[in-house]
Image (cartoon, rainbow, N blue to C red):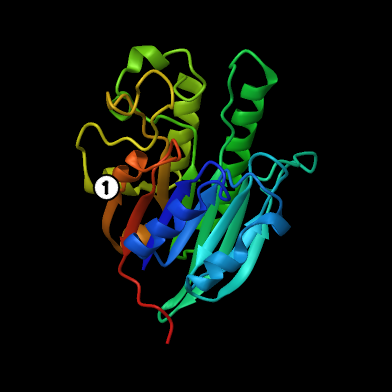
Amino acid sequence: MRIATWNVNSVRLRLDNTLAWLAERQPDLVCLQEIKCQDDQFPRAAFEAAGYNVAVHGQKGFNGVAILSRHPIDEVTTGLPGDDSDVQSRFIEVVVSTATGVVRVCGIYLPNGNPPDTEKYGYKLGWMKRLKTLVAQRLALEEPFVVAGDYNVIPTPADVHDPAAWAGDALFLPQTRAAFQELLNLGLTDALRAVSDAPGLYTFWDYQAGAWPRNNGIRIDHLLLSPQAAGLLKAAGIDRHTRGWEKPSDHVPVWIDLDIAPRG
């Protein structure tokens, strides 16, 4: 089973690119972030024609998450629990059935948190705390479980081209990195780092200042795996070439292969 994540930075604007990548990579399940549309505006028909079932949690103009699945979706949950006042569309979870049991996948778009001296950073840290609570609950189920998405977290200096340039950014502050490490300490595995310690593995390049031609990137899109999923991990990769496509997203897809057979 191939599971991927991609912040598409407007699904309607990047529809052709998204469909081209789906045909190329052939993922079984994809978590999309920043779809930037309401549920009824999501291009569902185009993805269904490509063979995917669709679950959407949209929002007008910004944010928004969705999951595409080649397998029937048994359950859908939207909205991260723990704060009834939070109306931002940043969390979606699905359960799909396979030949060996269920697989649970959460798609997240974690808050950016900048500027860090505003309430936006408090919202980010609060969101991460709520995510930690949910992850702990899900891990108790002892299922293959994947938390995939745009975390807006640079975990270590090895995950950024120029660490000094990001020293004061909410994505790289010590509190942010510590909160991410707390997720890993629950028992999650960073899939990409489980298969490679190579430098220069980035998933985002800013549109400004020639970041892409200079490979001035950061790694902020992650797939974190429960022990049951980590034990099935066969491969992981970054499709960085999509950043060079016409009208690209500033993020690129990240994917994993798990040793799980489809149902039927």
Percent of width and height locating residue 114: 58, 21
Q: How many marks?
A: 1
SS state under label 1: helix
Percent of width and height locating residue 132: 56, 42
Relative placement, left or right, of 178 versus 127 is left
**In the picture, residue 48 is in which quadrant?**
bottom right
Quadrant housing the C terminus: bottom left
Percent of width and height locating residue 171: 48, 25
Please tell me which residue lies in front, 252 or 164.
252
Looking at the image, the residue that sits furthest to the front is: 246
* Neighbours of disc 1 within 10 Å: few (<14), some (14-19), many (20+): few
Q: Eyeballing the image, is 143 above or below 210?
A: below
What residue is disc 1 on?
194
Going by the numbered disc 1, the residue's amino acid type is Ala
Can the viewer see residue 141?
Answer: no
Q: Eyeballing the image, is 223 above or below 167?
A: below
Percent of width and height locating residue 59: 71, 46
